[in-house]
Structure formats: structure tokens, C-alpha cells
Image (cartoon, rainbow, N blue to C red):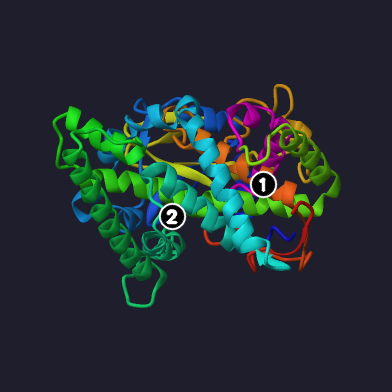
Amino acid sequence: MNHRRGCPEKFVIDRMCKFSPEVFKTSLFGEKIVVFCGASGNKFLFTSHNKYVTSWWPPSMAEVWYFPENQENTVEVCNKMRSVLPEFLKPDALQDYIPVMDSMAKEQLEKDWSPHKQVQVFSLSKKYTFASACKVFMNLIDPEQLTRLSNPFTHIVAGLISIPIKIPGTAFSRAVEGGRIVREELLAIIRQRKRELLENKGRLKSIDLLTRLLLASYENGETNDEKQIANKIIGLLVASHDTMSTALTCILNYLAEYPQVYEDVLHEQMEIAKSKSPGELLNWDDVKKMKYSWCVACEAMRLSPPVPGTFREAITDFTYAGFTIPKGWKTFWTTYSTNRNPKYFPDPEKFDPSRFEGRGPAPYSFVPFGGGPRMCPGKEYARLATLVFMHNVVTKFKWRKVNPDEKIIYNPTPTPENGLLIHLEIINS
């Protein structure tokens, strides 16, 4: 696969070579940005939260993502809601949802993959990851509601880092409108759930993330934070809609390119499948056995990182690697400074899942979910959803790429130009 078309990795590596392998200055979104490089740069930013730096989003992103009244205090909104997430998104709390994800994966593969000899992986993986997230986070399964939520997300993601010109027809304008539609749809869902909680005196059969967020707001005496809850769920849905589907698409791409890796994953997953009774769904013990499959997923994310990095803002003057970063300047850590760097990954262009066996890569050299207090709260959910999907697709199909030389484009995540078209062969009916 061609990884160089409009490649942000080349942008980073060229400047590391020209200026410094540790840090360099550039300009994005009309802001002075200091890009921290290498494992040491990652470690510094991850361990300096609220000491030297704090979270920051470009104003154009905030306009797409947040309600107007929340756009000036995005960090406060995020911190407030984030405090509730870890309990729900830790492994113990997510174990009960593994059979749900498994059932949804089986249903989608049977409905949208099996009847066809050729499918587009990216669009179908989006459908799975988004539907799975809506079910787990909001217990949402109504097809019409899912469609009303998912359709605008294509515009939101495409316009998140576009030039912020709000003229009809521009990517940014479509993203702002998509954000408005999604926020209003989520508000309707949140208000309906509040009515259900009141009618049932806070007791529901299923306690999903939305219910937990509402119950937490009641406990804190904050009964009017519907918009803050909607903002947090939008963040999780954006990640599930494009970031996770990008990862799944890249995993299937590399499994097509490396038949022996596919066979090794298939062997691991078939051993699990053989241990199950007819109709029995996956559980936590099954997922714990998918060690090699996760190594493959990590190697795919190393070579095609679904998240390039995130921003911070300096809250005081500080010095790093001999350079002084003034208060108010923005910083950025990036996967592109480490993932193909031979300092951390020998023979970096080689697809080699064994890199992640045993102790794995050096600390802070592979950080697909970020690190420190701002590490992606959905890390464990993403891992489970990825492994469940891998299990189902490799035990049901073999596949080959329609176009072995399909290019990678960045919009903003790395995706195959034509969505990864593959020919399917059913191996387990």
C-alpha cells in the first residue's frame, strides 16, 4: 500500500531532520504550535498535565463539536464529564458487553457481508463500530435513530480539521451543520432517558453509559447538564465512527497482505471458536486468549495510526530540550515521530506483530491511545470491540484485495482511497 499521498508523517519526519529530532515549531489553525517528538517528548507532555500544559482544541473543532455556550470552556466541560467515564469504561464494567458486541458483529457479517462476493471494508466497519458504540453507550438499537445519528458524522469528521470558512458547501460548513444535527438528536435521546429514569425512580434494567452520566449528575445536584453529557457522548461516537473503523480497515488490509499472519490469527481464533458450544457467544475469558490477534492489531496501528496525536496548551513558560515554550503557545505530540522510527522499531517498514510480544516496545514509543491523565478513556472498549470483530471476520472469511496497490489518503485519518474493496470467500457457513 502507498502510504505517502498527502502524508503527515513525511511532514513530521522532514522537520525533525531539518530542525531537531526532539522538538520543532510550526503553525496550524493560525496558532504557533510546538511539536514534541520521540518517546521523551511523549513522556514529557503526558506527565506534565496541569503542571506545564492543559488540554486544548482548535476553535474550529470546538465550533463543530460543542454547543455554542460550551465552546469557551471546552476543557472544563471535558474534565467534568471525564471523571465519570473510567468506572464505566474499565475492563470489569465492559465484560458484560462482550456478548453484545459479538452478537452485533455476527449479525452484521451475516447481513452485509455474506450475501456479497465483494464488499467495501471501511464503510461496513464504520457501520459495525458505530452501531456497537450506540448500543453499549446508550442502549440504542433503533435503525432510524442510528441512521439519523450516523449520516452527519461523515461530515463532522471530514470537516474537523478543515479550513474554518463557514460558506455553504465547504467542508467546515457541512461539519458545523452535522454537529448541530447530532447534538439535537442526542438531546432528544437524553431527555427521553431522563423521563424513563423519573418514571422508574432511577431504576432501569440496563445501566449504560448515558444512564450512569445522568445518575452522576443527579447525585451531584446538576440536573441541567444535558448539553455537557451530549458533548461527551459525541466525543466517544466520533472515535467509534472513524478512529476505530480506520483501525479495523487497516487490520484487514494487512491480513490480506500477509497470508501467514492471517493464518496465525485464524489458528488462534479457531481454537477459541472450537471451545464454544453452538450459539454460545464470546466472553471475557475468550478475549483474554486473543494475545497474538492484539499484537497484529497493534502492529497495524503502528504502521497506520488511526490517531496522529493531540494538542495541549502551555499554561506557564517552560523549557524543554533547550527551547523555551511561552505560556499560551500550543503543543502537539504525534505518533508519526516514533512509529516508523528505527530508534524504537528496528526495520520499521516491516510488518512484524512479534514486536508487541513479551515486554513490547520501549515506554512511550507506541501510544495509540495517548498517555497520562489524558489517555483515551475508551481504550479498553476499543480493544474489546476490535478483537471481537477480528474473531468473527477471520473465522468466517478469507479475502483478497481488489486493488493490491490502493493508495492511502488522509481525511484526517489514514484510509484506503476506495475504502478497501475486497473479494470474499466464506470458510465457515
Q: Residue at x 43, y 52 (%)?
A: 238
Under tag 1, what secondary structure? Answer: helix
Say which amino acid is labelled 2.
Leu
Query: The C terminus appears in which quarter of the rendering?
Result: bottom right
23 sits to left or right of 269: left
Identify the mark at residue 28; answer none if there is no mark: 2
For the question of whether residue 72 can be seen, the reply is: no
Q: Residue 264: horizontal and vertical position, in percent?
A: 82, 39
Q: Which residue is mark 1?
A: 392
Residues under labels 2 and 1: Cα distance?
A: 41 Å
How many residues crowd mark 1 within 10 Å: few (<14), some (14–19), many (20+)?
some
Q: Residue 89: horizontal and vertical position, in percent?
A: 44, 32
Tell me, yes or no, whether the two marked residues, 2 and 1, touch with CB atoms within 8 Å.
no
Task: Decide: is 117 above or below 338.
Answer: below
For this rendering, which residue is in front, 177 or 10?
A: 177
397 sits to left or right of 11: right
Q: Residue 38: horizontal and vertical position, in percent?
A: 60, 35
Task: Decide: is 45 above or below 390.
Answer: above
Q: Quadrant of residue 311?
A: top left
Under tag 2, what secondary structure? Answer: strand
Q: Which region is colored magenta?
A: 281-307
For this rendering, which residue is in front, 349 or 232?
A: 232
Q: Residue at x 25, y 33 (%)?
A: 203
From this viewpoint, which residue is outermost toward the top? 359
Q: Mark 2 against mark 1, which lies toward the viewer?
A: 1
Q: Quadrant of residue 350?
A: top right
For this rendering, which residue is in front, 93 or 351?
A: 93
Main secondary structure type of the part rendered in magenta? helix
Task: Decide: is 297 above or below 402.
Answer: above
For the question of whether residue 353 can be seen, the reply is: yes
Q: Residue 73: horizontal and vertical position, in percent?
A: 23, 43
Q: Residue at x 24, y 50 (%)?
A: 71
